[in-house]
Image (cartoon, rainbow, N blue to C red):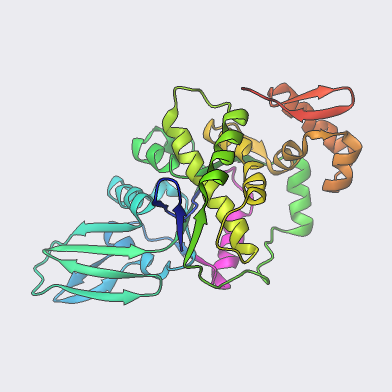
Amino acid sequence: MNIRDEKLNLNVRPTLNLFIKKQFGMAISSLFLDLAEKGHVNYINTYTEAGLVGTVVSGRLWKGQLAKSGYKLTVIDEITGLDNKSLKILNEITEHGRATRILQTFTSGDFEEVIEGGKYKVSSGMLELNIHTSFAFVTASDSVFKNPYVKTLMSRCFCLNLTLSKDEALQLKVTGRKIDVENIKSEIADEITLPADVNMRLLGYMEKLSFVEDELGGYYMRAHDDMVRISAVYAYLDDRNVINEEDVRKAIELYPLHQIGFKQISMSENEIKIYMLCNGKTVREIAEITGLSERQVRYYINLLLNAGLIARVGDRYFRKDFS
């Protein structure tokens, strides 16, 4: 699928990537493994350059694990296992949709091979893999953030810094962690268009709701692309190939959360749910929507108040306007 920016007459890459910093024991790995068994996820655990992309030996192509990622979510679970060469590969593929590596052995001729959602190309001693996939990078380590390649990778992702409260941990032991995949659409859209006037409306929303530092203009370039991608998903789910203002309004609801992730502010899943509902609602209204008790809602609201992310007006709560 292509997303066409009508005003600039260029394509926005359609793949939305996630970077999840989590605590141990959150059952996120189990969730992804379950999705892999159902065929929706390529769960990768081989982190060498050749293991990811592939290689050519005696004129024969040996495919890497990324070759199985076409039209799927690729999960890299615990990126501490990646060396810098592999991180460079992933930075390239998240930016351009392709990964290249220099072959260490002689190849007698150039050739191509089509795979699901992409293709391999061997030419002039280089192996190139083009693949249509989105990524979810997961880590429970704090040390990875010191690596500049990881920081670059994060700049291409919708980031979440997840914690786990006692209430959530005990609830997970009762319900487990599941995603409903029964009604996932599998049709491939050729192109979705972003009209110029709708894009201007999106930029207006972003101007009003932005609270990342003004001098970090690069973030806003990436964030706009992500908001366009999310808007395109809403259009696709409604069987349309043109993004409208309603799609943009739905997407922009996630923009504050996108900025919180970029600033590496940690939040539990219940905090995120309540934060997203702080648009003038009372404790009772939030409790009714989330299924949490009013005591639990007050606990999470106090966390959000202490973090300076929401404000109270009377008995109602609002996400803070940082602009």
Instruction: Please identify the quadrant where the C terminus is shown.
Output: top right
Q: Give the mark count.
A: 0
* 28 inside magenta stretch: yes
Q: Nearer the viewer, residue 249 or 108?
A: 249
Within the magenta stretch, is there residue 160?
no
Please tell me which residue is depicted at 62% across the width and 30% down the height of the picture. Answer: 209
Left or right: 127 in relation to 142: left
Among the 4 quarters of the image, the one containing residue 259: top right
Question: Can I make out residue 26 in this image?
Answer: yes
Residue 180 in the image: x percent, y percent? 69, 65
Compared with residue 131, is residue 78 higher up or lower down, i.e. above or below?
above
Determine the residue positioned at 49% across, 51% down: 17
Residue at left offset 46%, top offset 34%: 219
- Between residues 203 and 73, which one lies in front from this camera angle? 203
The residue nearer to you, when weighing 80 against 238, is: 238
Q: Quadrant of residue 51?
A: bottom left
Say which residue appears at 23% left-offset and 74% top-offset: 112
Q: Is residue 230 above or below residue 257?
A: below
Residue 29 x %, y % = 57, 56
Q: Position of residue 61 (x, y in %)?
A: 23, 74
Instruction: Please give the range of residues in magenta.
Output: 19-41
Q: Can residue 139 be seen in the rendering of this structure? A: no
Indicate the position of residue 305 as horizontal and vertical percent values. Answer: 75, 24
